[in-house]
Image (cartoon, coloured by chain):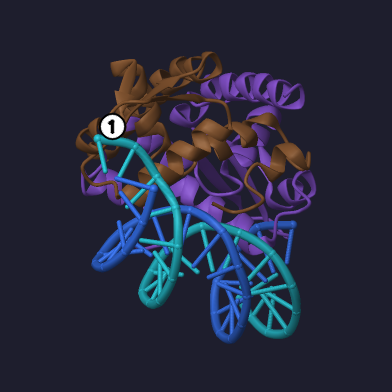
Chain colours: A brown, B purple, C cyan, D blue
Amino acid sequence: MPKDRLNKVSCNNYRCEIEVTLEILSGKWKALIIWNLNLHKSIRYNELRRLIPEITQKMLSQQLKDLEQNGLVNRIVYNEVPPRVEYSLTEIGEELIPILELMDKWGKLFVDNFKHS
Amino acid sequence: MPKDRLNKVSCNNYRCEIEVTLEILSGKWKALIIWNLNLHKSIRYNELRRLIPEITQKMLSQQLKDLEQNGLVNRIVYNEVPPRVEYSLTEIGEELIPILELMDKWGKLFVDNFKHS
DNA sequence: CTGTATCCTTGGTGATACTG
DNA sequence: CAGTATCACCAAGGATACAG
């Protein structure tokens, strides 16, 4: 994760807030993680790995940390043996869902368009 | 532009259509270009450069070409001297606007959240 | 189970110069 | 005016091994 993650926000050098949202969603696995967190409400680390088999541990940890630091995701640690950590969406994280749903819809439209051209 | 641009669509290796939409919007300037095309309806190359002063010619050409190839943007060449080229959104391009508006809204919410934390 | 640490590759972007 | 071409950088992401 670059030190200047979120530089657009913290440095105020974004040209419109769309770019802020895109910056937060950019990252190969972010949308997928958020999507799954919304579907399952609360998920453990290894459950996420199973839900997204192609992702590496490194990337999963990293993207979750990004999302957590941006306040989109809650990380709750239960002091048990073996350790248990549950991830879930925060309020502002949940507010992204309608956007993701629209993107899903538009994506289907585009794919359909693409096939017939 | 990578040869496998749109590989997710053409190779069918996307996990959900959200990723397709994100892939199309990803690229440092895409959203901004689409946003401006929507605001001004039809814009010439150099007008876009003035509207987005930080963009280089290379990137503007490249991102416009991407958008055109993906069918989001019309490119109309007028055979005049000096040459004139007008860019505008296609129908499917315009259907992205509601999404961008939501992203703008969410971005403002996030920035506000960020400032007070 | 839930992560870190390290090394490495590659493609997205920028700078700059050139063209019809 | 509306672009191309070329070179170079660097950070995102992948592979793999290790850790509490």
| Residue B6 in sight from this viewpoint | no
Identified at 47% across, 47% down, the residue is B68
What's the chain of the residue with tag 1? B
Identified at 64% across, 24% down, the residue is B104
Looking at the rendering, which quadrant does residue A36 occupy? Answer: top left
Image quarter in which the C terminus of chain A is found: top left
Residue A42, relative to residue B41: is it above or below? above
Q: Relative to the observer, which residue lies in front, A40 or B5?
A: A40
Left or right? Give the position of A61 relative to B107: left
Q: Relative to the observer, which residue lies in front, B44 or B69?
A: B69
Left or right? Give the position of A64 relative to A53: right
Give the amino acid at mark 1.
Answer: Cys
Q: Which residue is mark 1?
A: B16
User: Element type at marker 1?
Assistant: loop
Q: Residues within 10 Å of mark 1 (few under 14, many from 20)?
A: some
Residue B81 x %, y %: 72, 60
| Residue B96 in sight from this viewpoint | yes
Q: Relative to the observer, which residue lies in front, D3 or A84?
A: A84
Residue A87, relative to residue D17: is it above or below? above
Identified at 42% across, 19% down, the residue is A102
Looking at the rendering, which quadrant does residue B36 occupy? Answer: top right
